[in-house]
């Protein structure tokens, strides 16, 4: 199959996934390597509920689990990845996620703590020609429905470093957003899990809503 035809099919599939009838689905990426991809089980459900309430976007409250090498990836416009450890991609998996991203997908990787040494090589396998860049605070991703004039909110301390938001850019669009030293996913979880302050819980959900809105509008 020619590349142009493949991208057209991918675009059609993504268009269907963007539709509000049926509801949009948020995907949780199941990856290989031994990292706990299943961490933060309540995160995406809470984020979906928040988005429905605040942005009036019809989002399925139940997260979908999708394997990185599966064609089912193309049923999602937004996929979230979390964990504390290793993530590895085979050549076929890297090609699958690259094709999905080029066709309009958006991949959010959230370092739950300890993923950084593995995320960067994995992304190089997907886009060897591109580098992660730290996004400036005036980037549109921080100024969707909610404004974050100082960039990512700091949800969990971890090593005490400032939170940073990195982007992988393809044809002028951020296709991968990597949140580091922030832990948005923990902030999305049920309040009783991590007992973050109400302000941190809210700011994490607001930043997540910005990611979703950016993914669907850019």
Image (cartoon, grey):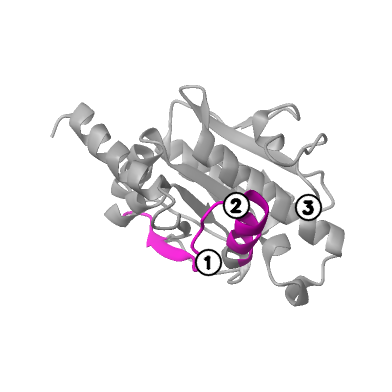
Distance CA(mark 2)–CA(mark 1): 13 Å
Residue name at image x 27 percent, y 33 percent: 7
Query: Which quadrant of the figure contains the N terminus?
Result: top left
Provide the residue span drawn in magenta. Answer: 46-69
Q: Earlier in the sequence, mark 2 or mark 1?
A: 2
Residue name at image x 23 percent, y 39 percent: 9
Q: Where residue 29 appears, x then y in whole percent?
A: 46, 58
Q: Where 192 falls versus 22 (above or below)?
A: below
Q: Which residue is mark 3?
A: 203
Q: Which residue is farthest top?
A: 172
Q: Where 62 falls versus 55 (above or below)?
A: below
**Magenta stretch containing residue 68, yes or no?**
yes
Q: Where 87 falls versus 36 (above or below)?
A: above
Residue name at image x 35 percent, y 41 percent: 15
Q: Where residue 115 appears, x then y in whole percent?
A: 60, 54
Circles 1, 3 touching at the beta carbon (< 8 Å): no
On the question of residue 157 being in view, the answer is no
| Observer-nearest of 216 and 84 | 216
Q: Which residue is mark 2?
A: 56
Q: Where residue 218 appears, x then y in whole percent?
A: 51, 32
Q: Which residue is farthest bottom?
A: 192
Q: Where residue 83 appears, x then y in whole percent?
A: 58, 62
Badge 2 crowding class, 10 Å Cα cut-off, few under 14, some 14 to 19, many 20 or more, is few
Secondary element under disc 3, as helix, strand or loop, is: helix
On the question of residue 137 being in view, the answer is yes
Residue name at image x 85 percent, y 58 percent: 199
Badge 1 crowding class, 10 Å Cα cut-off, few under 14, some 14 to 19, many 20 or more, is some
Q: Earlier in the sequence, mark 1 or mark 3?
A: 1
| Observer-nearest of 116 and 166 | 166
Q: Which residue is mark 1?
A: 61
């Amino acid at each position: 199959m020619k590349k142009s035809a493949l991208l057209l099919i991918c675009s059609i599939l993504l268009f269907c996934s963007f539709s509000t009838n049926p509801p949009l689905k948020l995907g949780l990426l199941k990856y290989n390597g031994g990292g706990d991809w299943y961490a933060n089980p309540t995160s995406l459900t809470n984020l979906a509920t928040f988005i429905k309430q605040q942005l009036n976007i019809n989002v399925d409250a139940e997260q979908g689990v999708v394997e990185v090498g599966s064609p089912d990836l193309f049923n999602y416009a937004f996929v979230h990845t979390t964990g504390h450890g290793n993530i590895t991609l085979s050549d076929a998996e890297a090609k699958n996620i690259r094709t999905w991203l080029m066709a309009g997908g958006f991949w959010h990787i959230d370092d739950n703590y300890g993923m950084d040494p593995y995320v960067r090589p994995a992304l190089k396998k997907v886009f060897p020609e591109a580098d992660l860049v730290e996004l400036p605070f005036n980037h549109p991703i921080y100024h969707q429905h909610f404004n974050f004039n100082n960039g990512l909110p700091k949800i969990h301390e971890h090593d005490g470093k400032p939170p940073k938001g990195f982007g992988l850019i393809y044809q002028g669009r951020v296709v991968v957003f990597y949140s580091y030293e922030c832990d948005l996913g923990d902030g999305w979880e049920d309040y009783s899990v991590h007992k973050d302050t109400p302000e941190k819980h809210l700011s994490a959900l607001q930043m997540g809503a910005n990611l979703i809105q950016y993914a669907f509008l850019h």
